[in-house]
Image: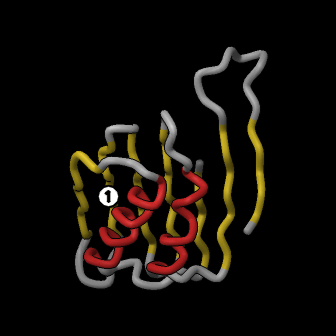
Amino acid sequence: MLLDLYQASNLSDETVIEDALVSAAEACGAKVLQKRLHSFGENQGITGMLLLAESHISIHTWPESGFAAIDIFMCGSCNPDLAIVPIKQHLRPKTIEVREFERGMSLDKATSQNKSI
């Protein structure tokens, strides 16, 4: 699942970003193995990743534009749709665009779905 957040808040706050990603992972039922975030400086963007037993969640933010890109890659019984609510609560975007892709299918059967929230 790919999330594009527009007019979001707290995009240069490393603590809020970490809390958002961890809360999202927990909401999905995922187990966090490692956390790594990097701030590019005061009022600058953050890039980060949670390594999960079920795969990963990554983020890159552009606070100057109010934009964040989040990738949620999960397997097993985890439901990535459940990550959306905690991400909204922490980063407060005005709009989220959601794209879901099924992975691991043969090319002739691969599908993608687009939806807006």
Task: Identify residue type, mark 1.
Answer: Gly
Q: Residue at x 44, y 79 (%)?
A: 90
Residue 74 place in picture, x, y as percent: 48, 40
Q: Residue at x 60, y 63 (%)?
A: 4
Residue 21 place in picture, x, y as percent: 38, 63
Residue 1 place in picture, x, y as percent: 59, 48
Q: Is residue 107 left or right of residue 59?
A: right
Q: Residue at x 32, y 38 (%)?
A: 53
Observer-nearest of 77 and 69: 77
Q: Is residue 104 above or below residue 9?
A: above
Q: Is residue 8 above or below residue 36?
A: below
Q: Which residue is mark 1?
A: 48
Number of numbered markers = 1
Q: How is the image coloured?
A: secondary structure
Question: What SS does tag 1 mark?
Answer: strand
Q: Residue at x 48, y 54 (%)?
A: 28
Q: Is residue 10 above or below residue 62?
A: below
Which quadrant is the C terminus positioned in?
Answer: bottom right
Q: Is residue 92 left or right of residue 17?
A: right
Crowd class of label 1 (few under 14; some 14 to 19; many from 20; radius 10 Å)? many
In the figure, residue 94 lies in which quadrant? bottom right
Residue 64 place in picture, x, y as percent: 46, 81
Q: Is residue 55 left or right of residue 39?
A: right
